[in-house]
Image: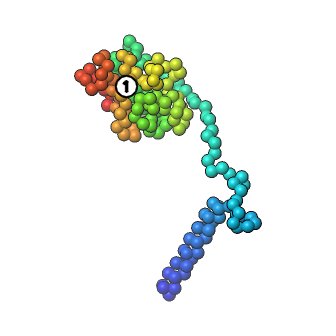
Amino acid sequence: MVRTRNLCFLAAFAVLAIAGVFLLLSNRIPPRAGDPTEPVESSSRAEPFPEKVEREIITLPEAEEVIAGLHSGDDDPLGDLERLGHLLYLYRQLVGANPEGGENMLIVESLNGANEKGLRFLPGGNPFVNEQGELVDRWGTPYFFHPVSRDEMEIVSAGPDAELWTEDDVRLP
């Protein structure tokens, strides 16, 4: 009795598995009309990858407020790093993780709207971005960004001597 029940269960499972495979294949393989050796017209199917849709980039006022005091006389170099850290915190909260890559230029691109949400965290005409598209410290040296994890970014300013990894570097862990 138990053996018969197990066999019935296995047979029913096999039928369902075969039906599932058939349904999957029937949705992916277009039916052929006429001669089975003729190729199927590709125009009868939808394109596998739709064209990239341009979306509007939205500038966040909260981010503009955070970045507005960067390099100001009211803050010191550590305060600048804290502002950038807060900006990256906003980015993580709204986009879900640190900007892709760890290079300064890639981070700036992400902060300028090249992220999956299309959100801009830096105002246009930003005086804190050099001609190479890098965020720079108050001495004009590009910041060094090190993604520690998905939710943490170390930021280093080279300091007044404009050389990284010397005693006057300013760090935000």
Number of numbered markers? 1
Q: Residue furthest front?
A: 37
The residue drawn where x is 62% and y is 50% is 48
Give the side of residue 155 with respect to residue 100, left or right. left
Q: Is residue 146 above or below residue 65?
A: below
> Percent from the top left, x then y, of residue 147?
37, 36
Q: Residue furthest top?
A: 73
Q: Nearer the viewer, residue 13 or 167?
A: 167
Q: Residues within 10 Å of mark 1 (few under 14, many from 20)?
A: many
The residue drawn where x is 34% and y is 37% is 148
- Kindly tell me whether residue 90 is visible in this rendering: no
Q: How is the image coloured?
A: rainbow
- Kindly tell me whether residue 147 is visible in this rendering: yes
Q: Nearer the viewer, residue 117 or 28?
A: 28
The residue drawn where x is 43% and y is 25% is 134
> Percent from the top left, x then y, of residue 73?
38, 12
The secondary structure type at the circle numbered 1 is loop
Question: Residue at label 1?
Answer: 143
Which of the 4 image quarters holds residue 167?
top left
Q: Amino acid at mark 1?
A: Tyr
Q: Is residue 168 above or below residue 13?
A: above
Q: Residue furthest right?
A: 34
> Percent from the top left, x then y, of residue 146?
35, 33
Q: Is residue 3 above or below residue 164?
A: below
Q: Residue furthest left?
A: 167
The residue drawn where x is 74% and y is 64% is 33
Q: Nearer the viewer, residue 54 or 68?
A: 54
> Percent from the top left, x then y, of residue 32?
71, 64
The quadrant of the image that shows the C terminus is top left
Give the side of residue 104 with respect to residue 7, left or right. left
